[in-house]
Image (tube, grey):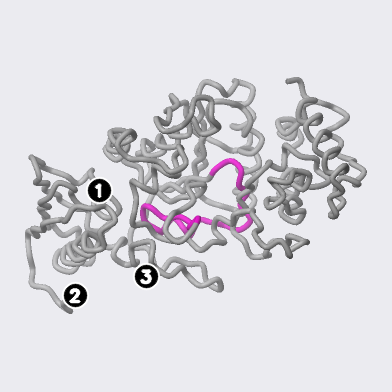
Amino acid sequence: MPRSYEKVDVVVARVPDGVRDVFRLQVNLVVANVLVNSGWEEGGDGEVYVVFIGRSGPMWEIFRCDDIIFEESDYKIYKPDLKRVKQKVNMPVGSCMIASSSSSLQPAGGTNTYKSRDAYVTVLHSSETYVCGAIALAQSILQTNSTKDLILLADASISPKSLRGLKAAGWKIKLIQRIRSPHAKKSAYNEYNYSKLRIWQLTEYDKLIFIDSDLIVLNNLDSFFSYPQLSAVGNDKYMFNSGLISIEPSQCMFETLMKNIVTFGSYNGGDQGFLNEAFTWWHRFHSKVNHLKVFQDPNNGKREIPDDLHTIHYLGLKPWMCYKDYDCNWDMSDRRRYASDSAHKKWWEVYDAMPGKLKSFCGLTKKMDARIQKWRGIAKSEGFRDGHWKIKVKDRRRTVHMML
């Protein structure tokens, strides 16, 4: 990139096709840098236009559809918000960027020059299975002294009683219509988790950090609102986990995503696969920002978790679906990789800090108890050496079962 730019009013760029084309990424970054360096004036908004030529258009991760002022055929004219663009070019873009060091989990690129309206958001749909998880999530965020709003999107499956409990936990409730995944099997667990796309409709906010309801927050996350859309933790070398993501709400972005729910594939049939197709160049959070509770090393018998995590993402059976005494993932051969007593304990510490009236939403039903007893019996018959099936359960929830 040149070290200096002449003052320009318009930038014209032909954008190559191919969402994962590195040259396409480079063209978008060059345009963004030209705009910022030629049009930015400290204390002012600047005024530079950009014309994109090509079927694919610019990258959603950098250029917002909200800034389009004219489009026809393969031509799109943007009047970008240079404050937003400057924030984006302050940080390297793409799945190849090196994550911030574990000693300092602050965003790269210095301080945020754009003061935004921020909120944490989660979504409940199709059943009340995760109501307890959402209450614990709110409790955990509040315990970190966050200054951000808490927004919960709920569909008609969430009862008025549960909505009152969620509100008492700290969530501001917004009712939604759920969205079905065209790639999910009927009655599958992820059949309606495209409902997560509704978070882009929360346009009263500039930035959102979406968090699934099977996470708890251990350390304050407020500084991570300075990361741009889309930021996440990697599931592998190039795919991200959508259980915790930073996004920028936009009605036209929501409409664009909805137009593509059939044409974009999804490797898992749900929102995670879809969003990885929609946002192919994304910013990396450090893995401690969304610590996946999974243990691949069979020799790590104790399954201890690090002390400096920002969150724990409870894969497998959820803590409230187990006894308080131990993680019942230990009892199932195909779920033992998710078992960790130290992570389990962290969740129940949040539960213990809840107001008494909210703990009732985390009760144990007779059906849940019967399932745990069944798998304890199987673990005993198979002689699992960890011996969790030998533990004498003292969980008081067993004495007062919830109604199904």
In the rendered image, the quadrant that contains the N terminus is bottom left
Tell me the tag on residue 394: none
Mark positioned earlier in the residue sequence (3 or 2): 2
Q: Is residue 80 above or below residue 203?
A: below
Q: Residue at x 59, y 38 (%)?
A: 170
Q: Amino acid at mark 1?
A: Arg
To which residue does mark 1 refer? 64
| Quarter of image, res 365 | top right
| Quarter of image, res 305 | bottom right
Q: CA distance from mark 3 to mark 2?
A: 17 Å
Query: Which residues are the magenta region?
Result: 212-235
Q: Residue at x 87, y 36 (%)?
A: 396
Q: Is residue 13 above or below residue 187?
A: below
To which residue does mark 3 refer? 109
Q: Secondary structure at mark 2?
A: loop
From the image, state whether disc 3 or disc 2 is nearer to you: 2
Residue 88 position within the rendered picture, expressed as x and y whole percent measured from the top left: 31, 61
Horizontally, is 246 left or right of 218 in the view? Answer: left
Tag 3 near tag 1, CB within 8 Å: no
Residue furthest front as drawn: 382
Q: CA distance from mark 1 to mark 2?
A: 23 Å
Q: CA distance from mark 3 to mark 1?
A: 21 Å
Q: Amino acid at mark 2?
A: Met
Q: Secondary structure at mark 3?
A: loop
Tell me the tag on residue 1: 2
Q: Amino acid at mark 3?
A: Gly
